[in-house]
Amino acid sequence: MTHDVMPGCEPFSHDGGPLGVLVLHGFTGNPTSMRSIAERAAEAGYSVELPRLPGHGTTVEDMITTTWADWSKTSEASFDELSQRCDRVAVVGLSMGGGLAAHVAEVRPSVAGCVFINPLVKPPGPEMLEGVNALLEGGVATFESIGSDIKREGVVESSYAATPLAPVKSLFEGIVAVHANLNLISAPSLLISSREDHVVTSDNGDDLEAMVSGPVERVWLENSYHVATMDNDQELVESLTLDFLARVF
């Protein structure tokens, strides 16, 4: 059974000009965290798709039934749909959305450019996966929330209050192939990294910067945590993204 979409968590779609931007949100998050950047891209004249990834923006119970295959297929389908109505398409992703953006760029070489915001592109060490497996085998379905890692006072991401373990395992398994194939990304990339991030370690960005075959520009944020698109550096993140898109298109 699927539940109603939480208010504000709806997908965003805009028919603009012949240049398209696919925007992807993070794990246990929803389009809310990326809506402002998607709207800015739309205002700049781009066609935009910000899908609500399967299992997100409703309930944790919904998400428990979803996997990396669901999220990656939705990302690919959104890119393909944009490509049918646009001459060129770029991808923008936060956290797991950054990993999905990398996946899309690996399997769709026509990607015009990539913006990675605190991306997850590297599988964790074996100890973490062993821990997840042990919890699942013990009948534990969720653990504490990883959402709303935001420094800005008074701002809260409408992410889930718990993290579903089976999807975490699927995410880690899916990221293995993403990491192994980073060299397939030849499009120009903008990598935006928070100095202090309590969700995704900075070596994810280090590996992306070192392994992709296309040019990478890396910018460090000094005043934001993981969800930088809603944090103190939101305006900087958005302006950097729009400037980059203007250059790659």
Image (cartoon, helix red, strand yellow):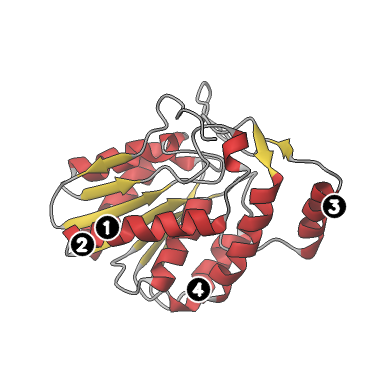
Measured in 3D between alpha carbons, the distance from the residue under mark 3 to the one under mark 1, in whole angstroms, is: 40 Å
Question: Which residue occupies 41% across, 56% down?
Answer: 75
Q: Which residue is mark 2?
A: 84
Q: Amino acid at mark 1?
A: Glu
Q: Which residue is mark 1?
A: 81
Measured in 3D between alpha carbons, the distance from the residue under mark 1 to the one under mark 4, in whole angstroms, is: 24 Å
Measured in 3D between alpha carbons, the distance from the residue under mark 3 to the one under mark 2, in whole angstroms, is: 44 Å
Instruction: Name the element at disc 1.
Output: helix
| Farthest residue, direction left | 17
Give whichever of 97, 247 is nearer the camera: 97
Q: Which percent across, then down, holds residue 102?
A: 45, 64
Q: Which percent across, then down, holds residue 120?
A: 56, 57
Q: Residues within 10 Å of mark 4 (few under 14, many from 20)?
A: many
Q: Earlier in the sequence, mark 3 or mark 1?
A: 1
Q: Amino acid at mark 3?
A: Ala
Q: Which residue is mark 4?
A: 182
What numbered label is drawn on residue 134?
3
Instruction: Name the element at disc 3.
Output: helix
Q: Residues within 10 Å of mark 2 (few under 14, many from 20)?
A: few
Determine whether 172 is above or below 238 in the image.
below
